[in-house]
Image: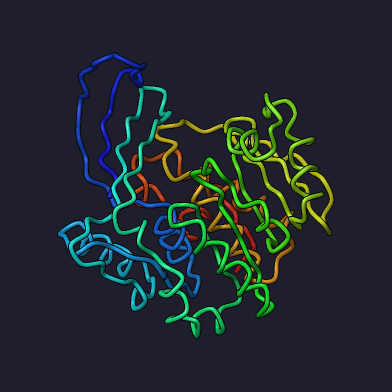
Amino acid sequence: MDLVVKVDHNPVTGETIIGSSLDYVPGGKGANQAYTAGKLHADVTMLGAVGDDANGQVLVNNLKNAGVDTSRILVKKNTPSGTALITVNKEGNNAITVVPGSNGKVTIEDIINNMDLLEKSDIVVMQMEIPIETVVYVAKKAKEMGKIVFLDPAPVPKEFPYEILPYLDFIKPNETEAAMLTGIKDTLSSYKEAAEKLRKQGVKNVAITLGKEGVYLDSEKCGKTKIDAIDVKVVDTTAAGDSFTAAVAFAVSNGKDYKTAVDFANKVSNVTVTKAGAQTSVPTYEEVKEFYGEDPGII
């Protein structure tokens, strides 16, 4: 659950500021991505965990309302649901602190107990808000089954499991995360080098999102390309990256190549930032079509 506070500016160390509002907004990187996929009319199932608290039930119901299959969402006893504390400044930029709660208790055993879900899926999309060993286990198992494996490497852990990279078909860091993953600083101007390094480490397709500068794709089959952001009025950047990842997966699941998929995802995330909140800002396929005045041609 995202606790979103609107502020004039994001606080610095030691500073106390006054927020203008507080909203409880369903969020979580995996849930945001499942929610987006559902709104885009994908056949999507969420595998994860909530706590046995009021927030957990709200989160599950919200996913159901977006068309997500929630039958594999686990309830962890005596545990709070994952929570994010988010400040959003007047420019729409955010600062986020995540308290894992039940997310931190998604175990390898939970995956083993739901292995049939991996077997019947075409694409498996993961994030780093659950234990690292669980993420690595899923990537290896999914690739053994011949599945398409996506990773949104956020939040980047201090000890990133680089052994996972050869199992990935697609990875989507933003410029900050790309710098953390590769050690290549100032990634906003050296994103090509960062993407190339990740490709050399085994990832087939790398998309580095660059905020208002757009996105850079280094793809095994589609080559290297920079797609500019679309000029929109930014209200809140929360869930922009999550809607992007889900939109790429949705397009790929519909047989599109990664360049087409990334171009579509760029459009989806640009619509997302025009609204406030996480899941509340995610557009339907029809809303994307209406926003741009043309059919994206994915379905």
Q: Please report the residue visible at 74 percent of the width from the left and 55 percent of the height from the top.
A: 203
Q: Is residue 69 left or right of residue 223?
A: left
Q: Is residue 16 left or right of residue 37?
A: left
Q: How is the image coloured?
A: rainbow
Q: Position of residue 280 (x, y in %)?
A: 33, 50
Q: Is residue 259 left or right of residue 250?
A: right
Q: Please report the residue visible at 64 percent of the width from the left and 71 percent of the height from the top.
A: 254
Q: Position of residue 111 (x, y in %)?
A: 46, 74
The residue nearer to you, when weighing 71 against 237, is 71
Q: Position of residue 131 (x, y in %)?
A: 45, 57
Decide if residue 283 is in sight here.
no
- The quarter of the image holding the C terminus is bottom right
Direction left: furthest residue: 54
Q: Position of residue 221 (x, y in %)?
A: 84, 59
Residue 121 against residue 97 in the figure, above or below: below
The residue nearer to you, when weighing 150 against 20, is 150
Using the rendered view, name the quadrant where residue 91 is placed.
top left
Decide if residue 173 is in sight here.
yes
Q: Is residue 293 left or right of residue 81?
A: right
Q: Please report the residue visible at 59 percent of the width from the left and 47 percent of the height from the top.
A: 160
Residue 258 against residue 65 in the figure, above or below: above
Q: How many marks?
A: 0
Q: Please report the residue visible at 64 percent of the width from the left and 36 percent of the height from the top.
A: 214
The residue nearer to you, when weighing 141 against 15, is 141
Residue 73 against residue 259 in the figure, above or below: below
